[in-house]
Amino acid sequence: MFSRILVANRGEIALRVIRACRDLGVEAVAVYSRADRDAAYLNLAHDAICIGAEPASASYLNPAAILSAAEISDVQAIHPGYGFLSENPVFAQMCRDCKIEFIGPPASAMRALGNKVEAKKLAKAAKVPMVPGSNGFVADEGEALTVAERIGYPVMIKAAAGGGGRGMRPAHNDAALRTNFRNARAEAEAAFKDGSLYIEKLIERPRHVEVQLLGDPKGNTIHLFERDCSLQRRHQKLVEESPSPHISVKTREKLCAAAVRLAKAAGYYSAGTCEFLVDGDENFYFMEVNARIQVEHPVTELVTGVDLIQWQIRIAAGEPLKLKQGDVTQTGHAIECRINAEDPDREFRPNPGRIETYIAPGGPGVRLDSHAYAGYVVGPNYDSMIAKLLVHRATRDDAIRAMRRALEEFKIAPIKTTIPLHAKIMDSMDFRRGQVDTHFIERAFMLAPHATAAPAA
Ligand code: MV4
């Protein structure tokens, strides 16, 4: 095992990784930008090193600053968390070239899976179901029309370099396809300096279901079941849960087995996630692989009892994955609410400021992953997530009630947060029936009166 690890991130995930290090008896070295110099979690690390100015580009996204901090603090490994440099194969290789282990997958797998068309080729070879579409890029409108004729309308135009829904346009007929193809290309060129597009059959009202994977370099690869992340707004996840309320035992088995096949085909190791779209008939289609630990990983930790961050560290240190597929079970139901410092009444605008009141929820089945506290200042430089509130209970109904209770206990003032929005979601009949697809928020939250009910007893 390593004796010292550098945590190349901030906020709740930096704290989560520091906790995993302490649980393993490993020293954690934190890094911070000048904006985070007063954050309390820095005191839980063995050491803390300033890596630059407030903008992420000067600090958390600056490989030279992070590697310098790693060299002077004599660490054997770097944990990148999520976001920032976590999915950057160049950074992963730089670490390893400096003889510092990058706690994550091999750069080769990050490269292969980071490219959407490349990832699809791998998925096809591994017999993972995919949305019918163009095989690779579509050169021009003429070719787009030919593809649409073959697969049938409606279709979805996607940017190869896109993500989070950017550069994505539906088309229901030839005329719309011509217009939207041109628009999508212009948008992709402007946003990513890469106008490459591809086309898929449009999946209506899809659910977002993803499979957690864990593997070692020897090819021991397992899944830790699925998370349902369908409850999103503008491609920002708001609520995640496991099990998915809308797949059968049989679909779950097929979905998880497909994800494991893909990870093996890609030579993937460490933690990762395979994303699928699931339609109303439980057909599932491969979307992409996230080559990092994800924000919502604690949902899986709760239902499986497996500490994913500890395993990432153990695997990077060369330990074999002793955990076998048969050892992993999905027990009870877990839900996560992402609490953001945003004002839902003002288009979810970030709402930075000093937290004066902070009363944390607790009690049976509650987990709170947060770096915030009374006196903490939410700055304008980074994303606005300040807490992940999770519950784990025997059934989905029990979990929803526990979440409702925990949300009521949770007091943050005077800054605006998404806590009241989450309370409304927990009260909504559609959510309680598990009737959540990717358009739930847009549909229900200008809150139609019939879509809500009194809080569960
Ligand atoms: C789709 C789709 C419908 N049909 N692809 C959005 C982000 C990207 N990762 C995939 N996305 C979608 N791809 C086809 N062929 C609908 C979406 C989509 C979506 C997917 C997952 C979660 C939320 C979403 C919200 C809107 C659209």
Image (tube, rainbow, N blue to C red):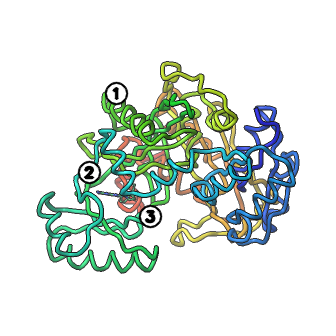
Query: Which residue shows up at 64% across the image and 34% down it?
Result: 315
Q: Residues within 10 Å of mark 3 (few under 14, many from 20)?
A: few
Question: Circle 3 sits in a helix, a strand or a loop, which is it?
Answer: loop
Give the label on residue 279, or none.
none
Q: Amino acid at mark 3?
A: Arg
Question: Circle 1 sits in a helix, a strand or a loop, which is it?
Answer: helix
Give the label on residue 249, or none.
1
Per the image, the residue denoted by label 2 is 131
Ligand 1 placement by image quarter: bottom left
The quadrant in which the N terminus is found is top right
Per the image, the residue denoted by label 3 is 234
Query: Which residue shows up at 80% across the image and 53% down it?
Result: 70
Q: Taking 6 as reference, is 13 left or right?
A: left
Q: Earlier in the sequence, mark 1 or mark 2?
A: 2
358 in relation to 157, above or below: above
Q: Amino acid at mark 1?
A: Val
Q: Position of residue 242 (x, y in %)?
A: 47, 36
Q: What distance separates the C-alpha of mark 3 from that of mark 2?
A: 22 Å
Q: Taking 429 as reference, is 134 left or right?
A: left
Question: Circle 2 sits in a helix, a strand or a loop, which is it?
Answer: loop
- Res 341 seen here: yes
86 in relation to 181, above or below: above
- Res 363 seen here: no
Q: Position of residue 401 (x, y in %)?
A: 52, 37
